[in-house]
Structures are given as C-alpha cells and as structure tokens.
C-alpha cells in the first residue's frame, strides 16, 4: 500500500515519554510512501536520540532554529512550504500553548506558524495536566480552527502511574488520520463529509398526558446539536429532527421539530430514504400514555393510574430498513454502561454505539444529560472482521469537542 505516496510530512516530536512511539509512527508513514522530516524540540532529545529518527526517516533531524548549516539547505520557511501536513506527536502542554497563542520560539513552533499546511496534533501528557483549565482552554481554541485536527489523547494507564486521558494516540490510529487527511481522493478537513446527508435526532420527546401535563426526560439537546454543528463543519447536509429544546438550531441545518416519539418517528421516516448516516442522540420516551385526556385531569383520587404503551423504536426501525444508512445509536445508562451499550449495538443491528454514563464519569465529573460536558465510549464492529469488536474512549471534554472527535471517527469508518 502507498496511500501517502509522495506526501511530505513534518513530524514534530516534543519532550514526553510517548516520543518513543513516534519512531514507530515514522516507520508506518514511510511504509505508506510518505517523506518525513522530523523536527524535535530540545526536550524531545532527552527522551529519544535524533539518530533513531534519522535512521528511520533517512533525513537529518532538524532541531535548531538558528542552525546555519541547516538553514543553508532547507531553511525553516522552505520547510514550512514543503510540508503537506504538519503532525505533532507527541504534543506537550507547552507546545500546545505556544501554538494556540502564536509563540514561535523554536524551530517547530516557527514552522507551524509559517506554514499553510494542515496541522494535526496528538496531545500526550499526565491526566491531571490534561484536565488543567489552561490546557482545556487551549484545546478548545485549537479545535475551533479549521486548519487544525486534534487526535486523542487516549485514556488508560500512564507512565507516571496515573490512569486517565493523556496517552498519545496509537501510531496506527494516527496513520489512519493522516491517510484520511492526505489521500489523493480524500477531502481535506472541512470537506470530509461534503455531498453526504446526515440525519440527527436530538433532545427529548414529550408524551402528553392531558392538555397541561406530559412525561419527558432531562435531555437538553446539547449533545445532538453539537454533533449537527460538527457534521456541518465537515461539509455535510444535515437534517436535524429535534424534540423541544431551548437551543437555537445550528445555522445551515435543515431543522424539523417533533414533539412526541410518534411524531419524531414520522419526521425521521419522511427524510430517511436519502440519508447516508443516521445518528440517534435523542432521548426518546420508551412509553406514552395509552389515552391522552382532552381535559385537565382533576385530583379527585389519592392515586392515579396512567396506562402506558410502548413507543416505536425509531433507531431500530431505521436500522432494519433494507437499504439502511450507516446507523449510530447512543446509550445513556446509569450502571453497567458497557454491557447495556453492547447489547443495543447487537440487538438494534447498529454500525456503532456511543455510550455515556448518566450522572457522572469515573473521574466524578457530571456527564450525560443537561451539562456542557460529557465522556463518550464508542463501540463498533470491525468492518472487515465483523466478529472483532473495536472500542474507543473519548475522555471528559465539552460536548462540542466530543462531537468533533466523534465525527472524526465516523469519517474514518464511513469513508474506509
Ligand atoms: O441532550 P443532552 O442533555 O445533551 O444529553 C445527551 C444524551 C444523554 C441525551 C445523549 O448523549 C444520549 O445518550 N442519548 C440517548 C439517550 C437514551 O436514553 O437512549 P436509549 O438507551 O433510550 O436508546 C438507545 C438508542 O435508541 C438511542 O440512540 C435513542 O435515540 C434510540 N431510541 C430509543 C428509543 C426509541 N423509541 N427510539 C429511538 O430511536
């Protein structure tokens, strides 16, 4: 395979324990036909010797901004122009801060500043650092730049003994992201879903009991609306079928309002035929009252029975269509999150299930309904080997950021 034939990549390596993984990354990129110029920060050299990267890339490693010899060859401006992609892996909190705020005090940050190439950043740091407000603010700023793609971090055991988000994304995964960005017939970030039609359900449904009362849930619509915006940012035509929320529909979305589960079912099926990807984030009521009273129920008795009947399952019905779109479901659970999510993946015959815990992540932060932040666990079956289950954790972050990461994963899967 040579998916990256003749593509020129500047690989920035910063000072972190994950720097050793970048050697494998160079090997994978070269194997795909890419030309790699490694640029190391000074602290990166404390972790891995430049000779390792030189041997693997076949090019002298660059490090110094004011290196007369190197500048006489390919100076930093030429290097910036040469690159089709700048990939920083691992990217430390320090380098992320410099890039966010336009500080160019070493060769790597100067090349980033002087280049029009797309910038891919794979953060790697201690989990406590990752959660630091300053880092989160910088990540938030970078993730809003059209020319920047953030990959990871992954969560798990860390070299320092902590457990949590902050591990550098695996080289094989980073390679996939590079191919997705640079493949000749692959569109660049901002274009990757151009021509695709995506239908997203979001928010709660309201099941009327009488003219003044209804049954519902705490869904604010924030997760679904963030996904709509992220898909629009990748050029997709997005149809949003939304339950009642206090949110303004994202610009450019084709917004269709639905009150009850039955109404949402109808609206979805009016549009589903032309849809490539269906993402069901709505918290649809599983049951509705058998009878909606025409008049307000009076409190004449001490107890009141309301008979309920099951609502149709919109997602399961879409996934059962003979010509079904790529189907992504959500699972909001208070306990046994993974087991329930996997059961839904299988039972509803989905392409992917996105699980979130209601009421708080393992790190004790509020997740799921209503808040601005969340933590997602993605599960899907490998496309080639349907018996192999793939999983990915998207650590605690804003719903906007998670939506962008989820869309990145969907792009990788859907365009494979
Ligand atoms: O809106 P926010 O406040 O931002 O909160 C986001 C969220 C927690 C609502 C969201 O992240 C989420 O998890 N949505 C799914 C909520 C849920 O309870 O799902 P479920 O386990 O009941 O259903 C599983 C899947 O089937 C979901 O994709 C759901 O949209 C779909 N479904 C369920 C029932 C039904 N009758 N029709 C459906 O389409």
Image (tube, rainbow, N blue to C red):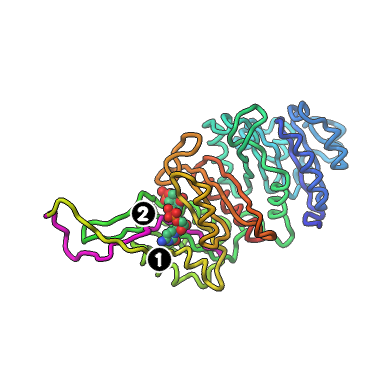
In front of the other: 326 or 196: 326
- 306 up-or-down from 40: above or below: below
Residue 336: percent from left, percent from top: 49, 45
Circle 1 is placed at which residue position?
312
- Indicate which quadrant contains ligand 1: bottom left
Q: Quadrant of residue 44?
A: top right
Q: Is residue 85 left or right of residue 35?
A: left
Residue 412: percent from left, percent from top: 65, 55
In front of the other: 124 or 347: 347
Q: Which is nearer the N-term, disc 2 or disc 1?
A: 2
Q: Quadrant of the N terminus?
A: bottom right
Residue behind label 1 places its C-beta within 8 angstroms of ligand 1: yes
Q: Is residue 263 left or right of residue 329?
A: left
Name the residue at 67% across, 45% down.
Answer: 120
The numbered disc on residue 233 is none
Residue 296 magenta-highlighted: yes
Q: Secondary structure at mark 2?
A: loop
- 206 up-or-down from 121: above or below: below
Circle 2 is placed at which residue position?
245
Magenta part of the chain: 277-300
Residue 222 at least partly seen: no
User: Crowding at label 1, few (<14), some or many (≥20) Cα neighbours within 10 Å?
Assistant: some
Which marked residue is nearer to the observer: mark 2 or mark 1? 1
Q: Main secondary structure of the magenta part?
A: loop
Q: Secondary structure at mark 1?
A: loop
Residue 262: percent from left, percent from top: 36, 66
Name the residue at 78% across, 41% down.
Answer: 24
Count of labels shown? 2
In front of the other: 112 or 254: 254
Residue behind label 2 places its C-beta within 8 angstroms of ligand 1: yes
């Amino acid at each position: 395979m040579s998916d990256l034939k003749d593509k020129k990549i500047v690989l920035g390596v910063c000072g972190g324990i994950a720097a050793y993984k970048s050697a494998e990354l160079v090997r994978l990129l070269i194997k795909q036909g890419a030309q790699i110029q490694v640029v190391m920060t000074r602290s990166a050299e404390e972790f891995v010797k430049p000779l390792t990267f030189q041997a693997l890339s076949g090019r002298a490693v660059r490090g110094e901004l004011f290196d007369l010899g190197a500048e006489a060859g390919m100076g930093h401006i030429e290097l910036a122009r040469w690159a089709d992609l700048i990939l920083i892996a691992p990217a430390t909190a320090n380098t992320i801060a410099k890039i966010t705020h336009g500080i160019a005090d070493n060769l790597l940050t100067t090349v980033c500043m002087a280049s029009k190439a797309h910038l891919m950043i794979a953060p790697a740091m201690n989990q406590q650092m990752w959660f630091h407000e300053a880092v989160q603010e910088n990540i938030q700023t970078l993730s809003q730049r059209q020319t920047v793609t953030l990959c990871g971090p992954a969560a798990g055991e860390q070299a320092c003994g902590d457990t949590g988000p902050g591990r550098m994304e695996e080289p094989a995964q980073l390679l996939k992201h590079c191919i997705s960005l640079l493949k000749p017939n692959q569109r660049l970030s901002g274009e990757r879903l151009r021509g695709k039609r995506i239908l997203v359900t979001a928010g709660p449904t309201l099941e009327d009991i009488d003219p003044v009362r209804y049954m519902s849930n705490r869904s604010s619509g924030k997760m679904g609306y963030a996904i709509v915006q992220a898909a629009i940012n990748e050029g997709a035509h997005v149809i949003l079928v939304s339950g009642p929320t206090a949110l303004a529909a994202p610009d450019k979305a084709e917004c269709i309002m639905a009150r009850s589960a039955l109404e949402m079912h109808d609206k979805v099926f009016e549009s589903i035929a032309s849809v490539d990807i269906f993402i069901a984030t709505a918290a649809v009521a599983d049951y509705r009252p058998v009878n909606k009273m025409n008049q307000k129920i009076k409190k004449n008795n001490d107890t009141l029975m309301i008979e309920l009947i099951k609502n149709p399952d919109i997602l399961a019905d879409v996934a059962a269509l003979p010509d079904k779109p790529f189907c992504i479901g959500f699972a909001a659970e208070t306990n046994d999150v993974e087991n329930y999510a996997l059961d839904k993946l299988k039972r509803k015959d989905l392409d992917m299930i996105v699980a979130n815990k209601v009421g708080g992540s393992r790190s004790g932060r509020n997740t799921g309904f209503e808040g601005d932040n969340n933590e997602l666990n993605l599960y899907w079956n490998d496309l080639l080997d349907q018996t192999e289950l793939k999983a990915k954790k998207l650590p605690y972050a804003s719903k906007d950021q998670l939506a962008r990461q989820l869309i990145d994963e969907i792009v990788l899967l859907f365009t494979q």
